[in-house]
Structures are given as structure tokens and as C-alpha cells.
Image (tube, rainbow, N blue to C red):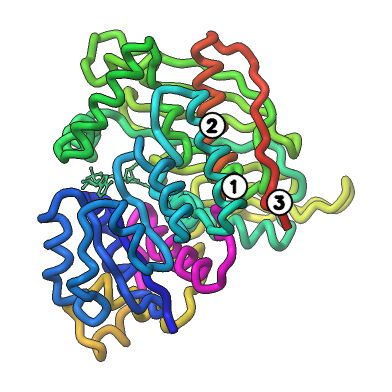
């Protein structure tokens, strides 16, 4: 028997995930929840959902969905709601997938408290939590993880991660903010945020740090121990940054494995640092390095045997792992609904969404629920990414004072 999944938060980002969750061969029931009834109706009316959706599985509050006999809940609500809702769902006996970040609020200490509560709730309830960080399943990360298994990096020396998203880029952040504020939950969120700002708390892009921090942390399987961060403050009285101490933040970290990491979070800077992507990383090792979709390797095991080996330029197709054939076929169907089964057999699988990460995130979560295990992006791993940003922002507020970064340890064995 397969598993049942409830999706809460059916706004713009959820529309990239509903078909994928519904299509996974191990999912045999899907349920929908949003406070805005028409957002539920849109999916309830979809003929593509029909074989796994019962009209009874329409919910208009998370409270009601938590009472249903579902195995897991996928949370794609506004970012300030994630942590509390994840805890509520785990307390109700559900495994949880949460869109990033763990939470996004202006209070750094409260954010750290929420991270601790998610870890504690997962341990106490035995329910699992996965953070849907897209960078972890980008093709670049998948390739680097294969190289880690071959021990091909040698010792990790240095890494960079960045999320460069200018406020006026094609995915316009002014419009995203307005769209998220338009619903009933969004209007409540505006009042919630005002209460933080009235206390004198200030935002910064390091409060949304998971895209930039995930690559270096996940590939090197390490965490930060110290940080120094500086910020750039908007100089044009742009209302978008009225409650932000900084519109761009740049941090330097000492990692537990001895490597140094630079993280850049930009919201007011034209273009981006990489020609490849705006959410990307590069990692240098003594024997192998990965940067801009290129693998560099010298084969060195000691000071006598290094070789000069030409760099290898990689395409996304080279870097993706293979999914199980039935899962790949189901996702192909979800992503090409206009094609017949015969036509699909001759169609290549082209993973889409944030570099092609979406199908892999869905597969990992569904498998973790079916196998009753923590996922690859469990609370302790997610905490590493999130804590780097929180402590970087704290450092920037103190003009770059070097701060210790708390370590959340690992899941109990
Ligand atoms: N690369 C990425 O990983 C990435 C990209 C985009 C968005 N996101 C994340 O996705 C999340 C959603 O973004 P969005 O743009 O779709 O937001 P949105 O405002 O369009 O959708 C959120 C929905 O959640 C619903 N909701 C909130 N609380 C609810 C409750 N208690 N019960 C039922 N429904 C509830 C709202 O009514 C709304 O429809 C954000 O947190 C964002 O950080 C991640």
C-alpha cells in the first residue's frame, strides 16, 4: 500500500509541486488545503488528480487537515508560518515536508528557538521533518556528492555559495511580496511583521540563507563554527528595504572541517556572480574542485604523484543521478500531460524547477515517509544551513564582529 499526502498552502510555488507529489508511484492519495477556497478548488477540479483524489479531502485550515488520517503533510505556506505549522503537523502524527526556509522572521534569537523546537519535536514524536531546499538536489550537488563518495575532492579547502536575486529581476521581489500579502494569511503576516519592526528588529537577506549555504554545507557534510559578516545598506530610501538593516550581506565562515566558506546574499545588486546560476556554489579540494559546471582533478595522493589532467565541462544531464524507472516515467507524465504513453516512451526525462531539483525533492520525501526514516535534509542538516544565516546577520548588525555559530549535532542513532 502507498502513502497519503496532504498539501497545505496552494499558492504560486505549490503549483510546481502538486502534479509531482500526486504522480509519485508510492503516493496513492492526495489531499488539498488552503484558507483561500478557490485555490483548493483549482486542484480538486483537475482531471489529472482524479484517480488519487477524493472530494472529501478538501480542507480549509491546517487544523482540519491535521485531524485527517494522512501520513504526511507538505507545507508550502508563507515563510513566517513554516516552523509553527511543521511542529503542529508532527504533533498530529504526520511526517512533514516544509518549503524553505525553516522560518523567516526578523528575530534571530526566536529563529534559533524554532530550530531547536523542530529538532525536539521530531525526536519526541518520532515524526520526520524534511526541509525542501532546492540546492541540495540541483545537478551540481548531485555530481559533487558522487565525487565525495569517490573521495575525489581530497581535503576540502574553500567553498563559496550565493543567492543573487535582485529586487527588480525577472522574478520581481516587489511582486512576490505583494502576492504573498494578498491572501488572508498574508494580511495577518503583515501585522505580525509590523510587531517585530515596532520592537526595532531589522531584516536582512541572510534571513533566507538556505539556497546559498546548503551547497557547501551539504557537499562537505560539515557545519559552521565562526562567522564574520558585513552588509550593504540601501541608500535610495527604497520602500522595499524600509525594514531591512541591509539589502546585501556577505559572510566568511570557519567550518568544522577546517575549510573556509564565503556566502553572498544579494537583493540589491545588478546581475549575479556566476555565469551558470544565481543560486550556486563552488568547492575547492586539495585533489579535486568543482566550479561553474567544471570538474578539476589532479589525482594527487601525495607530493610526488600529481598529474596535469584537463578540466571536464559538464552538462546538467551529465550531473543528474538516475531516478528509478517507474518514478522517472511517472514524473515524465506529470511534466508532459499533453503526451500519450507511447509518445512518453520516446521522450527524455528533463527534470524542471530550480535547476531540475523539484522531482528529486519529491522522490526523497516520499521515500523517507514510505521507509519511516529521516530524509537527507533532516532537521539537523537543515539547521546547519539556517543557523549560518542567522548568525551572519547577527554579526553584520555588530559591524562584522566574529561570532560563534551554534552546533545542533546529529540525529540520535
Ligand atoms: N527555491 C525555493 O525553494 C522557493 C521558491 C519560491 C518559494 N519558496 C517558498 O514557498 C513558500 C510559498 O510561497 P508562495 O509564493 O507560493 O506563497 P503564496 O502566498 O502564493 O502561497 C501561500 C499559501 O498558503 C496558504 N496558507 C497559509 N496559511 C495557511 C493555513 N494555516 N491553512 C491553509 N492555507 C494556508 C495561503 O492562503 C496561500 O495560498 C514560501 O515560504 C517561500 O519561501 C521556495
Residue at x-position 63% and y-position 62% = 146
Query: x, y percentage for residue 66?
Result: 35, 58
Q: Residues within 10 Å of mark 2 (few under 14, many from 20)?
A: few
Above or below: residue 200 compared with residue 163: above
Q: Residues within 10 Å of mark 3 (few under 14, many from 20)?
A: many
Placement of the N terminus among the 4 image quadrants = bottom left
Residue at x-position 17% and y-position 59% = 40
Above or below: residue 247 compared with residue 96: above
Helix, strand or loop for disc 2: helix
Q: CA distance from mark 3 to mark 1?
A: 21 Å
Q: Residues within 10 Å of mark 1 (few under 14, many from 20)?
A: many
Upstream in sequence: badge 3 or badge 2: 2
The residue at which mark 3 appears reads as 153
- The answer to whether residue 62 is seen in the rendering is yes
The residue at which mark 1 appears reads as 381
The residue at which mark 2 appears reads as 113
Q: Is label 3 within 8 A of ligand 1 (CB to nearest ligand atom)?
A: no
Query: x, y percentage for residue 344?
Result: 28, 83
Q: CA distance from mark 3 to mark 2?
A: 35 Å
Q: Which residues are magenta?
A: 349-378
User: Mark 3 or 2, which is nearer the eye?
Assistant: 2
**For residue 78, which quarter of the picture?**
top left
Helix, strand or loop for disc 1: helix
Amino acid at each position: 500500500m502507498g502513502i497519503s499526502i496532504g498539501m497545505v498552502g496552494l499558492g504560486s510555488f505549490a503549483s510546481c509541486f502538486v502534479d509531482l507529489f500526486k504522480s509519485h508511484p508510492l503516493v496513492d492519495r492526495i489531499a488539498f488545503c488552503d484558507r483561500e477556497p478557490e485555490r483548493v478548488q483549482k486542484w480538486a477540479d483537475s482531471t489529472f488528480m482524479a484517480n488519487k483524489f477524493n472530494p472529501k479531502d478538501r480542507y480549509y485550515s491546517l487544523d482540519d487537515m491535521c485531524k485527517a488520517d494522512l501520513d504526511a503533510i507538505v507545507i508550502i505556506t508563507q515563510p513566517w508560518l513554516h516552523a509553527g505549522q511543521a511542529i503542529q503537523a508532527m504533533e498530529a502524527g504526520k511526517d512533514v515536508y516544509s518549503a524553505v526556509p525553516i522560518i523567516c522572521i526578523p528575530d534571530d534569537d526566536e529563529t534559533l528557538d524554532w530550530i531547536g523546537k523542530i529538532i525536539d519535536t521530531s525526536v519526541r514524536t518520532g515524526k520526520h521533518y524534511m526541509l525542501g531546499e532546492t540546492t541540495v538536489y540541483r545537478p551540481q550537488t548531485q555530481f559533487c556528492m558522487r565525487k565525495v563518495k569517490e573521495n575525489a575532492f581530497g581535503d576540502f579547502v574553500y567553498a563559496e555559495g550565493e543567492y543573487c536575486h535582485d529586487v527588480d529581476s525577472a522574478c520581481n521581489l516587489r511582486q512576490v511580496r505583494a502576492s504573498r500579502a494578498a491572501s488572508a494569511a498574508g494580511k495577518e503576516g503583515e501585522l505580525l511583521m509590523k510587531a517585530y519592526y515596532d520592537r526595532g528588529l531589522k531584516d536582512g537577506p541572510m534571513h533566507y540563507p538556505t539556497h546559498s549555504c546548503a551547497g557547501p554545507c551539504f557537499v562537505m557534510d560539515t557545519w559552521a563554527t565562526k562567522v564574520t559578516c558585513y552588509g550593504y545598506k540601501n541608500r535610495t530610501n527604497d520602500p522595499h528595504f524600509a525594514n531591512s538593516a541591509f539589502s546585501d550581506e556577505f559572510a566568511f565562515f570557519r567550518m568544522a572541517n577546517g575549510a573556509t566558506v564565503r556566502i553572498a546574499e544579494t537583493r540589491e545588486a545588478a546581475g549575479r556572480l556566476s555565469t551558470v546560476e544565481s543560486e550556486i556554489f563552488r568547492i575547492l579540494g586539495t585533489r579535486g574542485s568543482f566550479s561553474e559546471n567544471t570538474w578539476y582533478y589532479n589525482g594527487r595522493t601525495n607530493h610526488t604523484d600529481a598529474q596535469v589532467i584537463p578540466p571536464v565541462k559538464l552538462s546538467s544531464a551529465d550531473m543528474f543521478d538516475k531516478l528509478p524507472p517507474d518514478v522517472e516515467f511517472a514524473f515524465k507524465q506529470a511534466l508532459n500531460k499533453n503526451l500519450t504513453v507511447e509518445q512518453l516512451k520516446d521522450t527524455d526525462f528533463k527534470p524542471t524547477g530550480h535547476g531540475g531539483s523539484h522531482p528529486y525533492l519529491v522522490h526523497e520525501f516520499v521515500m523517507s515517509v514510505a521507509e519511516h526514516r529521516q530524509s537527507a535534509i533532516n532537521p539537523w542538516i537543515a539547521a546547519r544551513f539556517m543557523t549560518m544565516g542567522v548568525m551572519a546577520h547577527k554579526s553584520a548588525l555588530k559591524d562584522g564582529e566574529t561570532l560563534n555559530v551554534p552546533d545542533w549535532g546529529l540525529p540520535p542513532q
